[in-house]
Amino acid sequence: MSQPHFADGGLRVTGLTITISDMVFDARLETEKAPSTCAAFAKRLPFDGQVVHVRWSGEAVWIPLGDLDFGVGYENHTTYPAPGQILLYPGGISETEILLAYGGVNFASKMGQLAGNHFITLSSGLDMLPEVGRRALWSGAQDIRFRSA
């Protein structure tokens, strides 16, 4: 049985495992709603970083990515992600970042309101999300790793 592929020939990853510190989450790429973002991110797997607590957006953690260019524009973008939704902000008025909502979020930066591409949804471990936020807020940066499942 062959693996599905993106139009550009890249392997289509749909399932992910996301590890934050010692917590493991299953997730899916939103390939139908954000195909370009998913393809660009899948090419970078495994993807490692650190999450820190947001400053302006509410109950979320983020991975600051500076001027990293994923080569995508807006698709399936939102300012109000639900808990367990992960956004990619492709850059522009603020730096590139990945944001994971664990509670109520109004996505913003010091530059003002932002919208990010909802491209990943957690499918397990939602009950552990408040702990992710608590640890990032009170203990500092937490290691995160995305890998194909």
Image: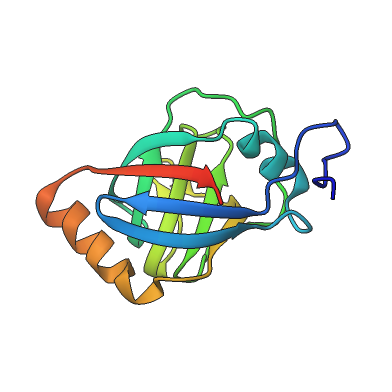
Left-right relation of 142 to 11: left
Q: Is residue 102 above or below residue 47?
A: below
Left-right relation of 20 to 69: left
Residue 15 x/y as whole percent? 61, 55
Q: Is residue 11 visible?
A: yes
Q: Please tell me which residue lies in front, 43 or 4.
A: 4
Q: Please tell me which residue lies in front, 119 or 112.
A: 119
Residue 137 x/y as whole percent? 17, 55
Residue 42 x/y as whole percent? 64, 38
Q: Please tell me which residue lies in front, 58 or 49.
A: 49
Residue 121 x/y as whole percent? 56, 63
Q: Residue at x 58, y 56 (%)?
A: 120
Q: Residue at x 68, y 42 (%)?
A: 37
How are the colours assigned in the image?
A: rainbow
Q: Quadrant of residue 79?
A: bottom right
Q: Is residue 5 above or below residue 27?
A: above
Left-right relation of 55 to 63: left
Q: Quadrant of residue 27?
A: bottom right
**Residue extending furthest toward the right:** 7
**Total numbered labels:** 0
**Residue extending furthest toward the front:** 1
Q: Is residue 40 above or below residue 88?
A: above
Q: Residue at x 68, y 53 (%)?
A: 14
**Residue extending furthest toward the bottom:** 127
Q: Is residue 78 visible?
A: no
